[in-house]
């Protein structure tokens, strides 16, 4: 199968607590170089999932689209692709956080803890705690996005933590080709989940990155997704 990305719309969804600023930069390398038009809807903490789904639906009114995202965004994108097989050309799934039910997943636990901290000690103190346990580049990214989404951020985090990702059985029904990227040193987004998605879907491949490389060059993550996609389909 051959696919031409030039002029194609790619709707890419941020992860929990992250934002459209980061995802534009993360996917601003190989995908944009191939001629795709990137749409990154800003997260709406008062209706996070609904906002993402609306952005996907709106973009698909003009023809088939590429869908994807990071963490929660990847799960929402795949679930949408499963329900709209004729409107989805390809999937780019970066750092998937869980398969199926979110309960017990490190990312869901982290989101609920962050929501609790934000409510109990406030934004500034919660950010200070987050910075103490995060790589500097990630702490800078989240400080910006958390501040912009405050004060509704805790609600968005709890909504994300309860969101059901695609199951293995559902991934097996995915018609679109999928490029998956996982970080080998990310405890919050275990690379085993990324591998599980790549194995479960009929046409999918996995590329891995490191958190350090992502900090040095944000496009590493998106480029890994596109490289993985190229293993499943010939891209023009």
Image (cartoon, grey):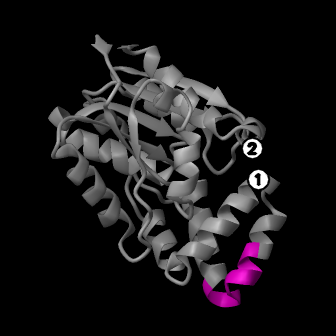
Q: Is residue 166 visible?
A: no
- Asked if one can make out residue 133 in the rendered structure from this viewpoint, the answer is yes
Q: Position of residue 194 (x, y in %)?
A: 53, 35
- Looking at the picture, tell me which residue is in the foreground, 162 or 217: 217
Q: How many marks?
A: 2
Q: CA distance from mark 1 to mark 2?
A: 6 Å
Q: Single out the residue that lies furthest toward the right.
A: 132
Tell me the quadrant of the picture where the N terminus can be found. top left
Secondary structure of the residue carrying tag 1 is: helix
The image position of residue 128, as x and y in percent, is 79, 74
Query: Between disc 1 and disc 2, whose residue precedes?
Result: 1
Contact between labelled residues 2 and 1, with CB atoms less than 8 Å apart: yes
Q: Residues within 10 Å of mark 1 (few under 14, many from 20)?
A: some
Q: Give the number of the disc on residue 164.
A: none
Secondary-structure class at tag 2: helix
Residue segment shown in magenta: 119-127
Q: Nearer the viewer, residue 203 or 3?
A: 3
Residue of label 1: 137
Q: Height in image: 204 above or below 70?
A: above
Label disc, if present, on residue 215 of the rendered structure: 2
Classify residue 220 by image quadrant. top right
């Amino acid at each position: 199968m051959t696919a031409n990305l030039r002029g194609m719309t790619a709707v890419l969804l941020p992860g929990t607590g992250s934002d459209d600023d980061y995802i534009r930069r993360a996917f601003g390398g190989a995908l944009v170089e191939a001629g795709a038009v990137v749409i990154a809807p800003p997260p709406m903490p008062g209706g996070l999932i609904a906002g993402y789904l609306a952005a996907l639906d709106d973009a698909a009114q003009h023809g088939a689209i590429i869908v994807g995202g990071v963490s929660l965004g990847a799960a929402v994108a795949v679930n949408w692709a499963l329900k709209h097989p004729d409107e989805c050309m390809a999937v780019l799934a970066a750092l998937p956080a869980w398969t199926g039910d979110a309960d017990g997943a490190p990312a869901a636990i982290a989101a609920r803890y962050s929501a609790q901290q934000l409510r109990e000690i406030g934004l500034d103190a919660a950010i200070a705690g987050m910075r103490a346990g995060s790589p500097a580049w990630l702490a800078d990214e989240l400080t910006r996005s958390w501040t912009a989404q405050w004060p509704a951020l805790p609600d968005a985090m709890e909504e994300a933590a309860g969101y059901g990702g695609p199951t293995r059985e559902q991934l097996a029904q995915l018609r679109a080709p999928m490029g998956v990227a996982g970080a080998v040193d990310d405890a919050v987004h275990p690379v085993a989940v990324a591998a599980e998605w790549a194995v479960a879907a009929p046409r999918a491949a996995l590329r891995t990155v490191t958190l350090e490389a992502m900090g040095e060059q944000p496009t590493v993550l998106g480029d890994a997704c596109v490289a993985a996609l190229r293993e499943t389909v010939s891209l023009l």
